[in-house]
Amino acid sequence: MTLFLDLNHSVGDFNLALKFQVPNGVSALFGRSGAGKTTLVNAVAGLITPQKGRIEIAGRAVFDAGRGLNIPPHQRGIGYVFQDPRLFPHMSVQRNLNYGRRPARSFEIDANLIVDILGLEKLLDRRPDTLSGGEKQRVAIARALLSNPDLLLLDEPLAALDRARKLEILSYLERLRDELRLPMLYVSHSVPELARLATDIVVMDAGKLVACGPASDLLSDPSLVPQLGLAAAGASVLARLTAQSEDGLSTLNTSAGQLFLPRIEAPLGSRVRVRILAQDVMISVQKPEQISALNILPCHIISLRPGDGPGMIVELNSGNDRLLARITARSAKRLCLQPDLACYAIVKTLSIRPAEVAI
Amino acid sequence: MPLFGLAPTEWQAVQLSLLVAFWASLLSLPLAVLVAYALARWQFWGRQLLNICVHLPLILPPVVTGYVLLLVFGQTAPVGRFLNDTFGIVLAFRWTGAVLAAAVMAFPLMVRAIRLAIEAVDPKLEQAATTLGAGPIRVFLTITVPMMAPGLVAGVVLAFAKAMGEFGATITFVANIPGQTQTLPSAIYAFLQVPGGDASAVRLLVLSVFISVLALALSEWMARRVVHGTGQ
Protein backbone atom coordinates (compact mmCIF):
# COMPACT_ATOMS: atom_id res chain seq x y z
CA MET A 1 0.00 0.00 0.00
CA THR A 2 1.07 3.52 -0.53
CA LEU A 3 0.00 6.89 0.63
CA PHE A 4 -0.35 9.43 -2.11
CA LEU A 5 -0.83 13.08 -1.37
CA ASP A 6 -1.21 16.13 -3.54
CA LEU A 7 -2.41 19.03 -1.43
CA ASN A 8 -2.94 22.72 -1.56
CA HIS A 9 -4.43 24.29 1.54
CA SER A 10 -4.19 27.80 2.93
CA VAL A 11 -4.97 28.95 6.44
CA GLY A 12 -4.37 32.69 6.81
CA ASP A 13 -0.80 33.36 5.69
CA PHE A 14 0.20 29.72 5.88
CA ASN A 15 0.13 27.73 2.68
CA LEU A 16 0.52 23.98 2.63
CA ALA A 17 1.35 22.87 -0.90
CA LEU A 18 3.12 19.61 -1.54
CA LYS A 19 2.91 16.38 -3.43
CA PHE A 20 4.52 13.08 -2.52
CA GLN A 21 4.02 9.36 -2.46
CA VAL A 22 5.40 6.88 0.05
CA PRO A 23 5.42 3.08 -0.17
CA ASN A 24 4.29 0.58 2.43
CA GLY A 25 6.06 0.82 5.77
CA VAL A 26 6.64 3.50 8.33
CA SER A 27 6.79 6.92 6.74
CA ALA A 28 8.06 9.65 8.99
CA LEU A 29 6.94 13.20 8.55
CA PHE A 30 9.75 15.42 9.70
CA GLY A 31 9.97 19.18 10.04
CA ARG A 32 10.22 22.04 12.47
CA SER A 33 7.15 23.03 14.46
CA GLY A 34 4.98 25.16 12.22
CA ALA A 35 6.03 23.23 9.12
CA GLY A 36 2.44 22.02 8.68
CA LYS A 37 2.90 18.42 9.81
CA THR A 38 -0.22 18.25 11.95
CA THR A 39 -2.28 20.00 9.26
CA LEU A 40 -1.13 17.40 6.76
CA VAL A 41 -1.97 14.50 9.07
CA ASN A 42 -5.39 16.03 9.80
CA ALA A 43 -6.01 16.23 6.05
CA VAL A 44 -5.14 12.54 5.67
CA ALA A 45 -7.49 11.71 8.56
CA GLY A 46 -10.25 13.85 7.05
CA LEU A 47 -10.46 16.17 10.05
CA ILE A 48 -9.84 19.14 7.76
CA THR A 49 -10.88 19.53 4.16
CA PRO A 50 -8.09 20.84 1.93
CA GLN A 51 -9.05 23.46 -0.65
CA LYS A 52 -7.43 21.55 -3.51
CA GLY A 53 -5.83 18.20 -4.09
CA ARG A 54 -6.13 14.45 -3.86
CA ILE A 55 -5.34 11.87 -1.18
CA GLU A 56 -5.12 8.12 -1.66
CA ILE A 57 -4.76 5.57 1.13
CA ALA A 58 -3.90 2.00 0.09
CA GLY A 59 -4.76 2.80 -3.50
CA ARG A 60 -8.21 4.09 -2.53
CA ALA A 61 -8.98 7.76 -3.13
CA VAL A 62 -10.36 9.23 0.08
CA PHE A 63 -10.27 12.84 -1.05
CA ASP A 64 -10.39 14.38 -4.49
CA ALA A 65 -11.35 18.03 -4.70
CA GLY A 66 -11.70 17.81 -8.46
CA ARG A 67 -14.32 15.05 -8.26
CA GLY A 68 -15.94 16.41 -5.11
CA LEU A 69 -14.96 13.24 -3.26
CA ASN A 70 -14.46 13.57 0.50
CA ILE A 71 -14.84 10.36 2.49
CA PRO A 72 -15.66 11.16 6.14
CA PRO A 73 -13.02 10.30 8.77
CA HIS A 74 -14.89 7.34 10.21
CA GLN A 75 -14.87 5.58 6.83
CA ARG A 76 -11.21 6.18 5.96
CA GLY A 77 -9.88 3.15 7.82
CA ILE A 78 -7.33 5.18 9.74
CA GLY A 79 -6.22 5.12 13.35
CA TYR A 80 -4.97 8.35 14.89
CA VAL A 81 -2.79 8.81 17.94
CA PHE A 82 -2.92 12.53 18.72
CA GLN A 83 -0.35 14.62 20.54
CA ASP A 84 -2.69 14.67 23.55
CA PRO A 85 -4.27 11.34 24.54
CA ARG A 86 -7.92 12.41 24.07
CA LEU A 87 -9.31 9.57 26.15
CA PHE A 88 -13.05 9.65 26.79
CA PRO A 89 -13.37 10.82 30.41
CA HIS A 90 -16.74 9.17 31.02
CA MET A 91 -15.53 5.68 30.12
CA SER A 92 -13.18 3.24 31.83
CA VAL A 93 -9.90 2.33 30.13
CA GLN A 94 -11.46 -0.94 28.99
CA ARG A 95 -14.40 0.87 27.36
CA ASN A 96 -12.02 3.36 25.76
CA LEU A 97 -10.11 0.45 24.24
CA ASN A 98 -13.30 -1.19 23.01
CA TYR A 99 -14.74 1.98 21.52
CA GLY A 100 -13.08 1.68 18.13
CA ARG A 101 -12.85 -2.09 17.81
CA ARG A 102 -13.99 -3.13 14.40
CA PRO A 103 -13.63 -6.19 12.20
CA ALA A 104 -10.17 -6.68 10.76
CA ARG A 105 -9.58 -5.18 7.35
CA SER A 106 -6.14 -6.48 6.53
CA PHE A 107 -5.00 -8.33 9.66
CA GLU A 108 -6.30 -9.16 13.11
CA ILE A 109 -4.65 -7.39 15.98
CA ASP A 110 -4.42 -9.44 19.14
CA ALA A 111 -6.04 -7.34 21.88
CA ASN A 112 -4.40 -9.29 24.70
CA LEU A 113 -0.98 -8.90 23.15
CA ILE A 114 -1.41 -5.14 22.85
CA VAL A 115 -2.73 -4.80 26.41
CA ASP A 116 0.20 -6.90 27.57
CA ILE A 117 2.95 -5.11 25.67
CA LEU A 118 1.69 -1.65 26.52
CA GLY A 119 1.33 -2.69 30.16
CA LEU A 120 -2.34 -1.89 30.47
CA GLU A 121 -3.75 -4.97 32.24
CA LYS A 122 -3.78 -3.26 35.66
CA LEU A 123 -5.36 -0.10 34.27
CA LEU A 124 -8.39 -1.61 32.53
CA ASP A 125 -10.92 -0.70 35.24
CA ARG A 126 -9.46 2.73 35.92
CA ARG A 127 -10.89 6.07 34.79
CA PRO A 128 -8.72 8.19 32.45
CA ASP A 129 -8.51 11.06 34.98
CA THR A 130 -6.70 8.75 37.43
CA LEU A 131 -3.93 7.88 34.93
CA SER A 132 -0.54 9.54 34.52
CA GLY A 133 0.38 11.22 31.24
CA GLY A 134 2.40 8.24 30.03
CA GLU A 135 -0.34 5.78 30.94
CA LYS A 136 -2.91 7.87 29.08
CA GLN A 137 -0.79 7.93 25.93
CA ARG A 138 -0.27 4.17 26.07
CA VAL A 139 -4.03 3.69 26.29
CA ALA A 140 -4.48 6.06 23.34
CA ILE A 141 -2.00 4.07 21.23
CA ALA A 142 -3.69 0.78 22.13
CA ARG A 143 -7.12 2.25 21.38
CA ALA A 144 -6.03 3.35 17.90
CA LEU A 145 -4.40 -0.04 17.20
CA LEU A 146 -7.48 -1.97 18.26
CA SER A 147 -9.53 -0.20 15.62
CA ASN A 148 -7.59 -2.29 13.07
CA PRO A 149 -6.60 0.62 10.86
CA ASP A 150 -5.22 0.35 7.33
CA LEU A 151 -2.95 3.24 8.18
CA LEU A 152 -1.95 4.38 11.64
CA LEU A 153 -1.34 8.11 12.02
CA LEU A 154 0.88 9.10 14.93
CA ASP A 155 1.38 12.78 15.71
CA GLU A 156 4.38 12.95 18.04
CA PRO A 157 2.93 10.24 20.24
CA LEU A 158 6.00 9.90 22.44
CA ALA A 159 6.44 13.60 23.21
CA ALA A 160 4.87 13.31 26.67
CA LEU A 161 6.63 10.11 27.71
CA ASP A 162 9.76 9.57 29.77
CA ARG A 163 12.83 8.06 28.15
CA ALA A 164 12.35 4.51 29.41
CA ARG A 165 8.72 4.40 28.26
CA LYS A 166 9.70 6.00 24.95
CA LEU A 167 12.22 3.25 24.20
CA GLU A 168 9.72 0.58 25.22
CA ILE A 169 6.95 1.93 22.98
CA LEU A 170 9.41 2.49 20.12
CA SER A 171 10.42 -1.16 20.19
CA TYR A 172 6.74 -2.11 20.20
CA LEU A 173 6.08 0.11 17.18
CA GLU A 174 9.01 -1.60 15.47
CA ARG A 175 7.35 -4.95 16.08
CA LEU A 176 4.11 -3.64 14.58
CA ARG A 177 6.09 -2.52 11.56
CA ASP A 178 8.01 -5.79 11.14
CA GLU A 179 5.53 -8.45 12.26
CA LEU A 180 2.19 -6.99 11.23
CA ARG A 181 3.46 -4.74 8.46
CA LEU A 182 1.14 -2.06 9.82
CA PRO A 183 1.63 1.04 7.67
CA MET A 184 2.21 4.18 9.71
CA LEU A 185 2.56 7.87 9.10
CA TYR A 186 4.69 9.04 11.97
CA VAL A 187 5.18 12.70 12.83
CA SER A 188 8.26 13.49 14.83
CA HIS A 189 11.11 15.90 15.14
CA SER A 190 13.34 13.47 16.93
CA VAL A 191 15.96 12.07 14.56
CA PRO A 192 16.84 9.08 16.80
CA GLU A 193 13.14 8.07 16.71
CA LEU A 194 13.04 8.37 12.93
CA ALA A 195 16.31 6.48 12.55
CA ARG A 196 14.86 3.53 14.45
CA LEU A 197 11.38 3.48 13.07
CA ALA A 198 11.16 5.05 9.65
CA THR A 199 11.51 3.20 6.38
CA ASP A 200 10.79 6.38 4.45
CA ILE A 201 11.07 9.99 5.39
CA VAL A 202 9.24 13.06 4.19
CA VAL A 203 11.02 16.27 5.15
CA MET A 204 8.93 19.42 5.01
CA ASP A 205 9.50 23.04 5.85
CA ALA A 206 7.02 25.94 5.89
CA GLY A 207 4.34 23.86 4.18
CA LYS A 208 6.60 22.74 1.33
CA LEU A 209 8.29 19.45 0.55
CA VAL A 210 12.06 19.48 1.10
CA ALA A 211 12.87 15.84 0.47
CA CYS A 212 11.17 12.47 0.30
CA GLY A 213 12.80 9.07 0.07
CA PRO A 214 14.11 6.00 1.87
CA ALA A 215 15.19 6.72 5.46
CA SER A 216 18.69 5.26 5.07
CA ASP A 217 19.41 7.66 2.18
CA LEU A 218 17.89 10.80 3.66
CA LEU A 219 19.23 10.36 7.17
CA SER A 220 22.80 10.26 5.90
CA ASP A 221 22.32 12.93 3.27
CA PRO A 222 24.63 15.79 4.20
CA SER A 223 22.49 18.27 2.26
CA LEU A 224 19.66 17.68 4.75
CA VAL A 225 21.78 18.53 7.77
CA PRO A 226 20.19 22.01 8.09
CA GLN A 227 16.75 20.40 8.36
CA LEU A 228 17.69 17.49 10.61
CA GLY A 229 19.82 19.69 12.84
CA LEU A 230 23.58 19.53 13.34
CA ALA A 231 23.38 17.69 16.64
CA ALA A 232 21.26 14.96 15.07
CA ALA A 233 23.20 14.62 11.82
CA GLY A 234 24.57 11.17 11.28
CA ALA A 235 24.26 8.00 9.29
CA SER A 236 22.89 4.51 9.71
CA VAL A 237 25.11 1.47 9.28
CA LEU A 238 23.76 -2.01 8.71
CA ALA A 239 25.46 -4.65 10.82
CA ARG A 240 25.15 -8.24 11.99
CA LEU A 241 25.62 -9.27 15.62
CA THR A 242 28.43 -11.83 15.72
CA ALA A 243 29.63 -12.11 19.33
CA GLN A 244 28.87 -11.10 22.92
CA SER A 245 31.92 -10.54 25.11
CA GLU A 246 32.12 -10.92 28.88
CA ASP A 247 33.35 -7.35 29.34
CA GLY A 248 29.91 -6.04 28.31
CA LEU A 249 30.56 -5.39 24.66
CA SER A 250 28.91 -6.76 21.52
CA THR A 251 30.76 -7.36 18.29
CA LEU A 252 29.10 -6.57 15.00
CA ASN A 253 30.17 -7.10 11.43
CA THR A 254 29.67 -4.29 8.96
CA SER A 255 30.64 -4.05 5.33
CA ALA A 256 33.66 -2.02 6.38
CA GLY A 257 34.87 -4.11 9.28
CA GLN A 258 34.17 -4.92 12.90
CA LEU A 259 32.23 -2.62 15.20
CA PHE A 260 32.27 -2.87 19.01
CA LEU A 261 29.26 -1.51 20.84
CA PRO A 262 27.89 -1.57 24.39
CA ARG A 263 26.04 -4.86 24.86
CA ILE A 264 22.99 -5.29 22.60
CA GLU A 265 20.35 -7.68 23.90
CA ALA A 266 19.58 -9.66 20.76
CA PRO A 267 20.26 -13.17 19.45
CA LEU A 268 23.53 -13.75 17.61
CA GLY A 269 23.13 -13.28 13.89
CA SER A 270 20.49 -10.51 14.26
CA ARG A 271 20.60 -7.74 11.74
CA VAL A 272 21.03 -4.41 13.45
CA ARG A 273 20.89 -0.84 12.25
CA VAL A 274 23.28 1.41 14.14
CA ARG A 275 23.01 5.16 13.89
CA ILE A 276 26.34 6.89 14.25
CA LEU A 277 26.12 10.62 14.87
CA ALA A 278 28.38 12.86 12.83
CA GLN A 279 29.67 14.58 15.95
CA ASP A 280 30.85 11.21 17.36
CA VAL A 281 33.08 10.48 14.37
CA MET A 282 36.72 11.55 14.18
CA ILE A 283 38.89 11.35 11.06
CA SER A 284 42.49 10.24 10.88
CA VAL A 285 44.54 10.06 7.68
CA GLN A 286 46.82 7.40 9.17
CA LYS A 287 45.66 4.31 11.00
CA PRO A 288 45.90 5.21 14.70
CA GLU A 289 47.54 2.47 16.77
CA GLN A 290 47.76 3.63 20.37
CA ILE A 291 44.27 5.01 20.85
CA SER A 292 41.49 4.14 23.28
CA ALA A 293 38.71 4.18 20.67
CA LEU A 294 37.85 0.64 19.58
CA ASN A 295 36.14 1.31 16.27
CA ILE A 296 38.44 2.28 13.45
CA LEU A 297 36.85 1.93 10.03
CA PRO A 298 38.71 2.42 6.73
CA CYS A 299 36.90 4.97 4.55
CA HIS A 300 37.03 7.14 1.49
CA ILE A 301 35.95 10.75 1.51
CA ILE A 302 33.01 11.42 -0.78
CA SER A 303 32.46 15.10 -0.16
CA LEU A 304 33.17 17.99 2.19
CA ARG A 305 30.42 20.43 3.08
CA PRO A 306 31.29 23.61 4.91
CA GLY A 307 28.67 24.89 7.35
CA ASP A 308 27.87 28.39 8.56
CA GLY A 309 30.10 28.12 11.63
CA PRO A 310 33.58 26.73 12.22
CA GLY A 311 32.43 23.16 11.53
CA MET A 312 31.91 21.13 8.41
CA ILE A 313 30.31 17.82 7.49
CA VAL A 314 32.50 15.19 5.80
CA GLU A 315 30.67 12.47 3.92
CA LEU A 316 32.49 9.15 4.01
CA ASN A 317 32.19 5.87 2.21
CA SER A 318 32.80 2.89 4.47
CA GLY A 319 32.34 -0.41 2.68
CA ASN A 320 28.77 -0.28 1.40
CA ASP A 321 27.71 2.19 4.08
CA ARG A 322 27.88 5.89 4.34
CA LEU A 323 29.14 7.78 7.38
CA LEU A 324 29.06 11.44 8.28
CA ALA A 325 31.72 13.12 10.35
CA ARG A 326 31.47 16.59 11.84
CA ILE A 327 34.86 18.19 12.22
CA THR A 328 36.26 21.73 12.22
CA ALA A 329 37.20 23.36 8.95
CA ARG A 330 40.62 23.99 10.50
CA SER A 331 41.22 20.25 10.95
CA ALA A 332 40.08 19.53 7.41
CA LYS A 333 42.57 22.08 6.12
CA ARG A 334 45.40 20.82 8.34
CA LEU A 335 44.86 17.21 7.18
CA CYS A 336 44.38 18.31 3.55
CA LEU A 337 41.11 16.40 3.33
CA GLN A 338 39.67 16.17 -0.15
CA PRO A 339 37.31 13.88 -2.07
CA ASP A 340 38.63 10.35 -2.80
CA LEU A 341 41.22 10.56 -0.04
CA ALA A 342 41.54 7.31 1.94
CA CYS A 343 41.26 7.78 5.68
CA TYR A 344 39.98 6.22 8.90
CA ALA A 345 36.77 7.00 10.79
CA ILE A 346 37.15 6.64 14.54
CA VAL A 347 34.09 6.06 16.72
CA LYS A 348 34.21 5.68 20.48
CA THR A 349 32.28 2.57 21.55
CA LEU A 350 30.57 4.27 24.47
CA SER A 351 29.38 7.22 22.39
CA ILE A 352 26.77 4.98 20.75
CA ARG A 353 23.68 4.94 22.93
CA PRO A 354 21.09 2.16 22.97
CA ALA A 355 18.44 4.42 21.39
CA GLU A 356 20.61 4.64 18.31
CA VAL A 357 20.64 0.90 17.79
CA ALA A 358 17.58 -0.47 16.06
CA ILE A 359 16.99 -4.19 16.25
CA MET B 1 -53.60 18.91 57.55
CA PRO B 2 -53.39 21.44 54.74
CA LEU B 3 -51.58 19.10 52.36
CA PHE B 4 -54.11 16.34 52.31
CA GLY B 5 -57.21 18.40 53.03
CA LEU B 6 -57.34 19.69 49.45
CA ALA B 7 -60.67 20.49 47.88
CA PRO B 8 -61.30 18.80 44.49
CA THR B 9 -60.63 22.00 42.51
CA GLU B 10 -57.38 22.57 44.38
CA TRP B 11 -56.26 18.99 43.80
CA GLN B 12 -57.19 19.26 40.11
CA ALA B 13 -55.05 22.39 39.78
CA VAL B 14 -52.04 20.62 41.30
CA GLN B 15 -52.47 17.58 39.08
CA LEU B 16 -52.92 19.72 35.99
CA SER B 17 -49.81 21.76 36.74
CA LEU B 18 -47.69 18.63 37.18
CA LEU B 19 -49.10 17.19 33.96
CA VAL B 20 -48.53 20.41 32.02
CA ALA B 21 -44.99 20.83 33.36
CA PHE B 22 -44.13 17.21 32.61
CA TRP B 23 -45.31 17.32 29.01
CA ALA B 24 -43.97 20.81 28.38
CA SER B 25 -40.43 19.88 29.44
CA LEU B 26 -40.50 16.46 27.78
CA LEU B 27 -41.85 17.63 24.40
CA SER B 28 -39.58 20.65 24.13
CA LEU B 29 -36.43 18.66 25.02
CA PRO B 30 -35.59 17.25 21.53
CA LEU B 31 -36.16 20.60 19.83
CA ALA B 32 -34.21 22.40 22.55
CA VAL B 33 -31.24 20.03 22.06
CA LEU B 34 -31.36 20.57 18.29
CA VAL B 35 -31.56 24.37 18.58
CA ALA B 36 -28.88 24.47 21.28
CA TYR B 37 -26.59 22.28 19.16
CA ALA B 38 -27.18 24.45 16.10
CA LEU B 39 -26.47 27.65 18.02
CA ALA B 40 -23.38 26.18 19.70
CA ARG B 41 -21.78 24.38 16.77
CA TRP B 42 -23.12 25.38 13.38
CA GLN B 43 -22.44 28.50 11.38
CA PHE B 44 -25.44 29.26 9.19
CA TRP B 45 -27.33 32.19 7.77
CA GLY B 46 -29.92 33.48 10.26
CA ARG B 47 -28.15 32.06 13.31
CA GLN B 48 -28.46 35.35 15.17
CA LEU B 49 -32.11 35.63 14.14
CA LEU B 50 -32.81 32.15 15.53
CA ASN B 51 -31.06 33.13 18.75
CA ILE B 52 -33.32 36.19 19.10
CA CYS B 53 -36.49 34.21 18.34
CA VAL B 54 -35.57 31.62 20.97
CA HIS B 55 -35.05 34.32 23.55
CA LEU B 56 -38.21 36.31 22.72
CA PRO B 57 -40.44 34.60 25.34
CA LEU B 58 -37.84 35.46 27.98
CA ILE B 59 -37.85 39.18 27.13
CA LEU B 60 -41.46 39.81 26.11
CA PRO B 61 -44.15 40.32 28.76
CA PRO B 62 -45.75 36.87 29.25
CA VAL B 63 -49.16 38.31 28.44
CA VAL B 64 -47.84 39.37 25.04
CA THR B 65 -46.54 35.88 24.38
CA GLY B 66 -49.91 34.44 25.38
CA TYR B 67 -51.67 36.88 23.10
CA VAL B 68 -49.38 35.95 20.19
CA LEU B 69 -50.18 32.28 20.82
CA LEU B 70 -53.86 33.15 20.74
CA LEU B 71 -53.43 35.02 17.47
CA VAL B 72 -51.61 32.08 15.89
CA PHE B 73 -53.19 29.04 17.52
CA GLY B 74 -56.67 30.39 18.38
CA GLN B 75 -59.66 28.51 16.97
CA THR B 76 -60.25 31.11 14.27
CA ALA B 77 -56.57 31.77 13.61
CA PRO B 78 -54.97 30.13 10.53
CA VAL B 79 -52.66 27.66 12.31
CA GLY B 80 -55.25 26.84 14.96
CA ARG B 81 -57.92 26.17 12.34
CA PHE B 82 -55.51 24.04 10.28
CA LEU B 83 -54.60 21.90 13.34
CA ASN B 84 -58.29 21.46 14.21
CA ASP B 85 -59.36 20.61 10.63
CA THR B 86 -56.45 18.28 9.89
CA PHE B 87 -55.61 16.57 13.17
CA GLY B 88 -58.55 17.51 15.38
CA ILE B 89 -56.16 19.25 17.76
CA VAL B 90 -57.54 22.23 19.66
CA LEU B 91 -55.11 24.19 21.77
CA ALA B 92 -56.81 27.41 22.82
CA PHE B 93 -58.68 27.14 26.13
CA ARG B 94 -57.64 23.49 26.56
CA TRP B 95 -54.98 21.92 28.83
CA THR B 96 -52.97 21.07 25.71
CA GLY B 97 -52.73 24.80 25.08
CA ALA B 98 -51.39 25.21 28.61
CA VAL B 99 -48.66 22.72 27.68
CA LEU B 100 -47.82 24.78 24.59
CA ALA B 101 -47.74 28.04 26.54
CA ALA B 102 -45.55 26.54 29.28
CA ALA B 103 -43.23 24.94 26.72
CA VAL B 104 -42.78 28.19 24.81
CA MET B 105 -42.09 30.13 27.99
CA ALA B 106 -39.61 27.53 29.32
CA PHE B 107 -37.88 26.99 25.98
CA PRO B 108 -35.26 29.77 26.22
CA LEU B 109 -34.14 28.64 29.67
CA MET B 110 -33.78 25.07 28.48
CA VAL B 111 -31.86 26.06 25.34
CA ARG B 112 -29.49 28.29 27.32
CA ALA B 113 -28.62 25.56 29.81
CA ILE B 114 -28.10 22.91 27.12
CA ARG B 115 -26.13 25.26 24.86
CA LEU B 116 -23.68 26.01 27.67
CA ALA B 117 -23.29 22.27 28.22
CA ILE B 118 -22.61 21.60 24.53
CA GLU B 119 -20.08 24.41 24.35
CA ALA B 120 -18.23 22.80 27.24
CA VAL B 121 -17.81 19.52 25.34
CA ASP B 122 -14.32 19.36 23.82
CA PRO B 123 -14.66 18.83 20.03
CA LYS B 124 -11.26 17.10 20.11
CA LEU B 125 -12.87 14.15 21.85
CA GLU B 126 -15.53 13.96 19.15
CA GLN B 127 -12.76 14.06 16.51
CA ALA B 128 -11.00 11.19 18.28
CA ALA B 129 -14.25 9.21 18.20
CA THR B 130 -14.66 9.74 14.45
CA THR B 131 -11.11 8.49 13.81
CA LEU B 132 -12.11 5.36 15.75
CA GLY B 133 -14.81 4.68 13.18
CA ALA B 134 -17.84 6.27 14.84
CA GLY B 135 -20.31 8.03 12.55
CA PRO B 136 -21.93 11.37 13.51
CA ILE B 137 -24.93 9.80 15.28
CA ARG B 138 -22.81 7.40 17.32
CA VAL B 139 -20.41 10.23 18.24
CA PHE B 140 -23.35 12.36 19.38
CA LEU B 141 -24.97 9.60 21.45
CA THR B 142 -21.82 8.11 22.99
CA ILE B 143 -19.61 11.16 23.44
CA THR B 144 -21.53 14.43 23.20
CA VAL B 145 -24.67 13.46 25.14
CA PRO B 146 -22.92 11.78 28.10
CA MET B 147 -20.52 14.70 28.42
CA MET B 148 -23.27 17.32 28.36
CA ALA B 149 -25.60 15.28 30.59
CA PRO B 150 -25.30 17.52 33.68
CA GLY B 151 -26.37 20.51 31.56
CA LEU B 152 -29.18 18.47 30.07
CA VAL B 153 -30.51 17.64 33.54
CA ALA B 154 -30.18 21.27 34.60
CA GLY B 155 -32.06 22.41 31.49
CA VAL B 156 -34.93 19.99 32.05
CA VAL B 157 -35.29 20.88 35.74
CA LEU B 158 -35.20 24.59 34.96
CA ALA B 159 -37.85 24.13 32.27
CA PHE B 160 -40.01 22.03 34.59
CA ALA B 161 -39.85 24.67 37.32
CA LYS B 162 -40.63 27.43 34.86
CA ALA B 163 -43.57 25.43 33.44
CA MET B 164 -44.94 24.79 36.94
CA GLY B 165 -44.93 28.49 37.69
CA GLU B 166 -46.01 29.85 34.30
CA PHE B 167 -48.97 32.19 34.70
CA GLY B 168 -49.20 35.15 32.32
CA ALA B 169 -49.05 33.43 28.94
CA THR B 170 -51.11 30.49 30.18
CA ILE B 171 -54.01 32.56 31.52
CA THR B 172 -54.03 34.69 28.36
CA PHE B 173 -53.98 31.73 25.98
CA VAL B 174 -56.13 29.14 27.77
CA ALA B 175 -57.91 31.26 30.42
CA ASN B 176 -58.57 29.95 33.91
CA ILE B 177 -61.24 27.25 33.72
CA PRO B 178 -61.34 25.12 36.90
CA GLY B 179 -60.77 21.47 36.13
CA GLN B 180 -59.67 22.19 32.56
CA THR B 181 -57.06 24.91 32.29
CA GLN B 182 -56.68 26.07 35.88
CA THR B 183 -53.07 25.41 36.82
CA LEU B 184 -51.63 25.90 40.30
CA PRO B 185 -50.67 29.58 39.86
CA SER B 186 -53.99 30.39 38.17
CA ALA B 187 -55.83 28.66 41.03
CA ILE B 188 -53.95 30.68 43.65
CA TYR B 189 -54.76 33.84 41.70
CA ALA B 190 -58.45 32.82 41.44
CA PHE B 191 -58.74 32.02 45.16
CA LEU B 192 -57.29 35.41 46.02
CA GLN B 193 -60.05 37.06 43.99
CA VAL B 194 -62.90 35.59 46.03
CA PRO B 195 -63.74 36.31 49.72
CA GLY B 196 -62.76 33.41 51.96
CA GLY B 197 -60.40 31.92 49.40
CA ASP B 198 -57.31 32.64 51.53
CA ALA B 199 -57.22 29.19 53.11
CA SER B 200 -57.18 27.46 49.73
CA ALA B 201 -54.50 29.83 48.45
CA VAL B 202 -52.28 29.12 51.46
CA ARG B 203 -52.73 25.36 51.05
CA LEU B 204 -51.66 25.60 47.40
CA LEU B 205 -48.79 27.87 48.35
CA VAL B 206 -47.43 25.32 50.83
CA LEU B 207 -47.88 22.57 48.26
CA SER B 208 -46.04 24.47 45.53
CA VAL B 209 -43.14 25.14 47.89
CA PHE B 210 -43.09 21.42 48.67
CA ILE B 211 -43.07 20.44 44.95
CA SER B 212 -40.34 22.94 44.14
CA VAL B 213 -38.08 21.72 46.94
CA LEU B 214 -38.69 18.13 45.86
CA ALA B 215 -37.84 18.92 42.23
CA LEU B 216 -34.68 20.74 43.30
CA ALA B 217 -33.58 17.82 45.50
CA LEU B 218 -34.31 15.38 42.70
CA SER B 219 -32.28 17.37 40.21
CA GLU B 220 -29.34 17.68 42.61
CA TRP B 221 -29.41 13.93 43.08
CA MET B 222 -29.60 13.27 39.35
CA ALA B 223 -26.84 15.72 38.56
CA ARG B 224 -24.60 14.02 41.13
CA ARG B 225 -25.33 10.64 39.64
CA VAL B 226 -24.64 11.88 36.14
CA VAL B 227 -21.43 13.62 37.16
CA HIS B 228 -20.28 10.50 38.97
CA GLY B 229 -21.26 8.42 35.94
CA THR B 230 -19.22 10.56 33.57
CA GLY B 231 -16.23 10.53 35.86
CA GLN B 232 -15.85 14.30 35.85
Image (spheres, coloured by chain):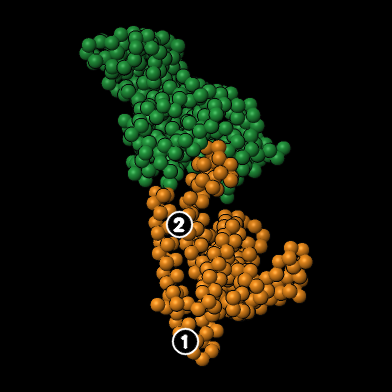
**Residue under the point 45% across and 77% down:** B5
Image quarter for residue B107? Answer: bottom right
Label 2 sits on residue: B150
- Which chain is green in the rendering? A
Task: Tell me the colour chain B is drawn in.
Answer: orange
**Residue under the point 45% across and 36% down:** A97
CA gap, disc 2 and disc 1: 40 Å
Q: Where is residue A158 in the image (x, y as percent from the top left)?
A: 40, 35
Q: Where is residue A193 in the image (x, y as percent from the top left)?
A: 41, 28
Residues at discs 2 and 1 both on one chain: yes
Image quarter for residue A265? Answer: top left
Tell which subunit mark 2 falls on: B
Image quarter for residue B58? Answer: bottom right
Q: Where is residue B132 in the image (x, y as percent from the top left)?
A: 52, 37
- At label 2, which amino acid type do we have? Pro
In the image, farthest residue toward the bottom = B195
Under circle 2, the secondary element is: helix
Q: Looking at the picture, does residue A303 appear above or below residue A145?
A: above
